[in-house]
Image (cartoon, rainbow, N blue to C red):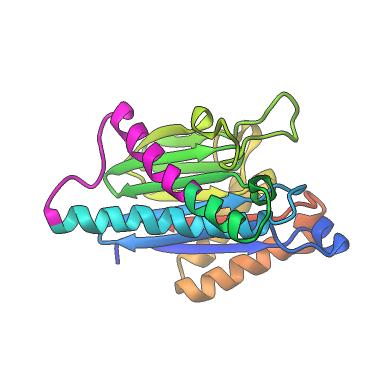
Amino acid sequence: MVWRVFAAAAVGSSHVQAGLPCQDAYAFQVVGDALVAAVCDGAGSAASSHVGAAVVSAAVVNEVASHLLSARASGSKPWPETVEEAYGWLRELLSEVRAQLVRHAQAAESPLADFATTLVGVVTTPAGGWFFHVGDGVGVADACDAGSTVSQPENGEYANETYFITGEDWARHLRLLRIVAPQRLALMSDGAASFVMGKGNQTLFAPFITPVEKFLLATDETSGSAALARTLSDARTDRITPDDKTLLLAYA
């Protein structure tokens, strides 16, 4: 397997106290030498945002993975190479994902806003690919001797405001970022970013990632993901943030 993937989500202390579920979700698939992954963070004020996050993360990964399998079968390129073409491809794909969520909301007889969620995703091979992003959360790609490529969060006028794929203007807030030769990838919700990222969100926070990574690379993905879940649930993280925390780490 080209990619080793470790991922976990932990409910925040504020959600535990309020009797709310974890409103984060993640999904990933490895298709040949390609990795497709997504992390979604449901809006804290939306009644069914945990469902929206779960539906969107799974649907995004399934849609992209299906496209990659079809491209492989036909011998075509896995995805467009220019920013303009990639934006059009991902906008069309995410429109279908959003339509699935609309149908889910209609079946539940609930407004779409009840399922509000952000999205940070990646589709890449070890040679390179794309981050795609709506709202907050962070994506990081590290390449040997090339520093970090960071897909930054987008917030509104106030720090606690952001944008959701359920919003009418979601496509205007869809951002793409090219990544080249990634050896390590990280996707995270904004709760995890508060202690996983260094100052200014320029790179991963070494005092956190170094011991975590040392353990992960010495174990299997199931054991590593379970250990990562324990780390995210540690009381020390609750002292940093009361929010839900999701982190996905992948190594080529």
Q: Nearer the viewer, residue 59 or 113?
A: 113
* Rendered residue at 45%/35% (across/down): 149
| Lateral position of residue 131 relative to residue 230, left or right | left
Residue 228 appears in the rendering: yes
Q: Residue furthest right?
A: 17
Q: Is residue 180 above or below residue 124?
A: above
**How far across and how far down the image is residue 238, in percent?**
79, 56
Q: Nearer the viewer, residue 75 or 4?
A: 75
**How far across and how far down the image is residue 116, in percent?**
65, 46
* Rendered residue at 44%/44% (across/down): 94
| Lateral position of residue 141 relative to residue 88, left or right | right
Q: Is residue 88 above or below residue 122?
A: above
Q: Nearer the viewer, residue 114 or 234?
A: 114
Q: Is residue 77 magenta?
A: yes
**How far across and how far down the image is residue 166, in percent?**
59, 42
| Lateral position of residue 105 relative to residue 250, left or right | right
Residue 211 appears in the rendering: no
- Screen quadrant of the N terminus: bottom left
Q: Residue furthest left?
A: 75
Q: Is residue 72 magenta?
A: no
- Screen quadrant of the C terminus: bottom left
Predominant secondary structure, magenta span: helix
* Rendered residue at 67%/48% (across/down): 111
Q: What is the total number of numbered labels drawn onto the structure image?
A: 0
| Lateral position of residue 114 relative to residue 5, left or right | right
User: What span is colored magenta in the figure?
Assistant: 74-98
**How far across and how far down the image is residue 248, in percent?**
52, 56
* Rendered residue at 53%/55% (across/down): 103
